[in-house]
Image (spheres, helix red, strand yellow):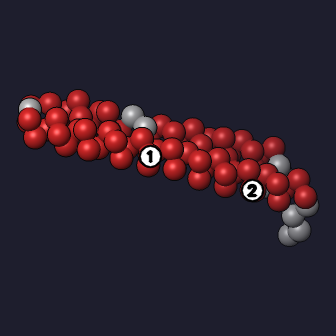
Amino acid sequence: MAIDLNGAIAAIGAGVAIAGGAMGTGMAQSGIGSAGIGLIAEKPNQIGIALLFLVLPETLVIFGFVIAILVMLAGGLI
């Protein structure tokens, strides 16, 4: 199977979409995680709120994955 230039650019774009979402999530979770641990240390009954705020940035990876799939579909890779 030969990949033309459009397919190669689509593959690179899909990789950038996933990598950007993953790096953004990691950067967001680093601050949120440390603040959440501080909150749990002071108020142990607030663990649900801390967990909710820690999970929210994971949507960035999901959005990156969806964009990567759409780019690969447009590039003819899928």
Which sits in the foreground, 2 or 27? Answer: 27
The answer to which quarter of the image holds residue 53 is top left
The vertical placement of 30 against 39, above or below, is below
Q: Which residue is drawn at 83% across and 59% down?
A: 8
Q: In which quarter of the image is residue 32?
A: top left
Q: Can residue 9 be seen in this view?
A: yes
In this picture, is 12 found above or below 37? below
- At label 2, the amino acid type is Ile
Q: Which is more foreground, mark 2 or mark 1?
A: 1
- Spatial distance from mark 2 to mark 1, Cα to Cα? 22 Å
Looking at the image, residue 13 sits to the left or right of residue 56; the answer is right
In-image side of 54 versus 25 (left or right): left
Instruction: Tell me what residue is drawn at x 37 percent, y 44 percent.
Output: 29
In percent of width and height, residue 23 lies at 51, 50
Q: Residue 12 carries which label?
A: 2
Image quadrant where one finds the N terminus: bottom right
Report the residue at 59% width, 43% height from top: 64
Of residues 12 and 2, the one nearer the viewer is 12
Q: In the rendering, which numbered label is found on residue 27?
A: 1
Give the secondary structure at mark 2. Answer: helix
Q: Residue 14, how many percent across, how many down?
A: 70, 51
At label 1, the amino acid type is Met
Residue 71 vs residue 29: left or right?
Answer: right
Position of 14 compared to 47: left or right?
Answer: right
Q: Pointer 1: residues within 10 angstroms few (<14), some, or many (20+)?
A: few
> What element does badge 1 sit on?
helix
Quadrant of the rendered image containing residue 35 = top left
